[in-house]
Image: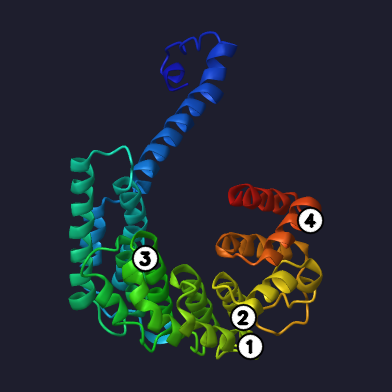
Amino acid sequence: AVQGLAGHAAPDPGPPPSMGKQMAQLVIIPAVIAIVAIGLFWIFGSIAATPDSLDDQLRRLKQPSGYGGDLMAGAQDPRYKDRCQAAFQIAAIIERLVTEANDPKLSEAERAKKVQKLRELSDELVVVLEKGVLPHEHDLQHFMVRAIGRLAQPGGFEPIMARSQSPNLQVRAGVLLAIMGWADSDIETARAALPVLVDLLKDPHEQVRTLAAAGLWAIATPDDRHVIPPLKEAMASIGVDPNSRLYQSSVSHAAIALAALGDEQGATHVVEVLLNREALARQRADMTGQSDATMNKNEQDHLIASVLHYVKTMEDPRIWMRIEQLSKSDSSLDIRKAALQLLAERK
C-alpha cells in the first residue's frame, strides 16, 4: 500500500498456498515438533529414572544427615531422607547380588569373587552403621540392619543383635527382619538369636510380637522345647497394644510356630480357626478394634493363602486333612490350586 501511494504498483500477492502446504503448516509440522519434544522428554526421563550404581548409593549413605529426622512437626532434613532412600536402594541391590552369588551355573572362582564382594559391602555397611548413624536415626538403622542381615556375612551379626533392645519400635522390627533374612543364608548363625526372639514375643507392640513369632517359625526346631511356653503365652494374648492394634496377627503367628514345632494346641488353632472359613468369618477385619466388621471373603482368602505358606513344616495329620478338603471344595480357585500344590510337594 505504501508503495502504491508512492506511485508504484502493489506487488502481485501470487496464488494462494496449496491445500497440502496449508496442511503441512497447520498440522504436520506442529505434530513433528510435538513428537520430537515427547521423544526428548522420554530420553531425559529415562536417564533421570536410571537407578544409581551401588557406589553412588554408598556415597549418598555416607553423607551427613544434616539436622536428621526429628525436626518440628515430624519433618526430616532432606539429607537424612536421602540417606534413608540410599539405604533402601542398597537393600534392593543386595537382593540381586545375593541371587547372583548363589547362581549354580557359576564356577568356583566366579562365586568366590562375588562372595568377596558381598563381604566387602557388609564390612562397609557395618562401619557406616557403627560410626555414621546416630542413636536417634531410627529409620536409617531399620534399613541398614535389614541390609546387613540379608548379606549374612561375618562381622555383621553382632551389630544387628546389639540393637535388639532399642527403645524404638521400627529398629526392633528391623532387627527381627534382619534375623530372618540372615536365616535364609545361614540358619545356624541365626539360631543364636533364639533368646532375642523369645524375649521380643513379650514386646508390647503387635508388629514386633508378630515378627518374633514368624522368626521362631523360621529358625526354631522341635528340640527347642524352651520356646513353647512363651509362644503359648503370646497365643493367649488379648487386648490392644500401645498403638491400639489388636493382638490378633501375633496370636495367629504364635499358633503357626507352635504347630510347626509339633504342639497340639497350635495345630488345633491352625485347623479350627486359620484354615476354617466359618471361624474366619467371625474374626475382626479391623486390626485396630475400632470396628466390629468381620473378615469378608477376600480377606479370608488372603489369610488362608498366608497360612498355607507356613504349613509345609507342619506334620499334624489334621492339618493335612484340612488342606485336602481345601483342595477339593474351597470356594477360591487360587486356594484350591495352592492346596493341591502343597499336597503334591508333600508326596
Q: CA distance from mark 4 to mark 1?
A: 29 Å
**Nearest to N terminus: mark 3 or mark 4:** 3
Is residue 78 found left or right of 233 in the rendered image? left
Is residue 35 found left or right of 327 in the rendered image? left
**Considering depth in this image, is 269 or 299 the residue closer to the camera?**
269
Residue named by callout 2: 251
**Nearest to N terminus: mark 1 or mark 3:** 3
Residue 25: x, y in percent?
51, 22
Q: CA distance from mark 1 to mark 3?
A: 28 Å
Looking at the image, residue 319 lies above or below residue 94: below
CB-based contact (under 8 Å), mark 4 and mark 1: no
On residue 187, which mark appears?
Answer: 3
Residue named by callout 4: 330
**Nearest to N terminus: mark 4 or mark 1:** 1
Q: Residues within 10 Å of mark 3 (few under 14, many from 20)?
A: some
What secondary structure is marked by label 3? helix
User: Which amino acid type corresponds to the residue marked 2 in the rendered image?
Assistant: Val
Residue named by callout 1: 236
Is residue 246 found left or right of 170 in the rendered image? right
Q: Residues within 10 Å of mark 1 (few under 14, many from 20)?
A: some
User: Which amino acid type corresponds to the residue marked 1 in the rendered image?
Assistant: Ala
User: Which amino acid type corresponds to the residue marked 3 in the rendered image?
Assistant: Ile
| Residue 81 in sight from this viewpoint | no
What secondary structure is marked by label 2? helix
Residue 161: x, y in percent?
31, 79
CB-based contact (under 8 Å), mark 1 and mark 3: no
